[in-house]
Image (tube, rainbow, N blue to C red):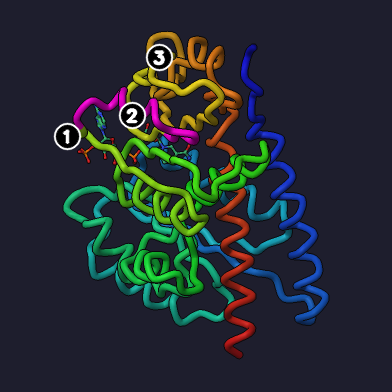
Amino acid sequence: MSAEIIDGKQIAGRVRITVARDVEAYSETFSGATPGLATILVGDDPGSAVYVAGKQKACKEVGMTGFNYPLPADTSREEVVALIERLNADAAVNGILLQLPVPAPLDGVELTGMIDADKDVDGLTAVSAGRLALGIQGLRPCTPQGVMTLLESVGTELEGAEAVVIGRSNLFGKPMAQLLLEANATVTTCHSRTRDLAAVCRRADVLIAAVGRPRMVKGDWVKPGAVVVDVGMNRTDDGLAGDVDFDAVKEVARAITPVPGGVGPMTIAFLLRNTLQAARMARSRG
Ligand code: NAP
């Protein structure tokens, strides 16, 4: 029997509607104030510009205030640092996002690290990663949070389940593994040096692929009845492809995300949710 297709577009749409409703309630409570998201884009990479424009548009659609800071590619480190410090101190700004990658010689990791962890809506600073590792309240990375919601949407039992994450990036693989662990799954993180990857994957009740290699996960890597989430976004000659061989795996899995239309739409939805959470946290600190 063919797997249930997890409709990320529809689920992300529902998250956005909830955020919009919550933003309205926030505004009513706080005399018309709205959560604010600042985006910083250094340079003129067209792909990054499209991403930032999408984030700003989504922000306005849910009633938040967007602040956009496009900077020329030759902006100095000191200028970016000064902007981040100014936004850190600005009470109207609840979330700050530095679009990555930044052009050389700027260091995206160093600059991201300067964002106040309470405004770190991408959840990428060392403080946010530490809070996640310790189970302390904080802002979690958007895409892994989105994957948790997709898993929930198909009633995935995580407690005691074998979960395998392929990929150990700071952006996705590591925080994904932490969230699954927090949900009491037994988690294995795989990477380029993992021995017999296929055998490890076959143990998984929940298999999450975030590698960046088109259709790497084959049908016979998947345990019958597993839930498979494909985070990969690979541009190929025949269009966008995930890390999972969708046609083969959908015949084995119980549920699977497509590419596009699976994980992708969840990221912006959770960026909006994080911005609202950051605004609420700021209010509760007074
Ligand atoms: P990344 O930083 O390049 O990490 C890739 C990971 O895959 C690394 O941990 C690497 O292992 C591992 N890997 C590479 N080749 C492998 C192999 N043959 N077998 C097993 N593991 C292998 O990538 P990322 O940022 O996590 O992103 C991964 C994919 O997800 C990309 O396609 C990206 O576009 C996509 N993505 C999508 C979204 C979204 O939809 N919103 C968000 C984030 C990422 P080593 O650590 O050993 O090198």
Comes first in the chain, label 1 or label 2: 1
Side of 256 relative to 96 (left or right): right
How many other residues sit within 10 Å of disc 3, few (<14), some (14-19) or many (≥20)? some
Badge 2 marks a residue whose secondary structure is loop
**Which mark is on residue 220?**
3
Ligand 1 lies in which image quarter? Answer: top left
The Cα atoms of the two marked residues, 1 and 2, are separated by: 15 Å
Q: What amino acid type should be assigned to the residue bearing mark 1?
A: Arg
How many other residues sit within 10 Å of disc 2, few (<14), some (14-19) or many (≥20)? some
Comes first in the chain, label 1 or label 3: 1
Query: Do the residues under discs 1 and 3 have CB atoms within 8 angstroms?
Result: no
Quadrant in the rendering for residue 251: top right
Which of 282 and 82 lies nearest the eye of the viewer?
282
Badge 3 marks a residue whose secondary structure is helix
Q: What amino acid type should be assigned to the residue bearing mark 3?
A: Asp
Residue bearing the label numbered 1: 193
Q: What stretch is highlighted in magenta?
A: 195-208
Q: Which of marks 2 and 3 is in front?
A: 3
Query: Do the residues under discs 1 and 2 have CB atoms within 8 angstroms?
Result: no
The Cα atoms of the two marked residues, 2 and 3, are separated by: 20 Å
Residue 206 locus on image (x, y percent): 49, 36
Which of 115 and 57 lies nearest the eye of the viewer?
115
The Cα atoms of the two marked residues, 1 and 3, are separated by: 20 Å
Badge 1 marks a residue whose secondary structure is loop
**Which mark is on residue 212?**
2
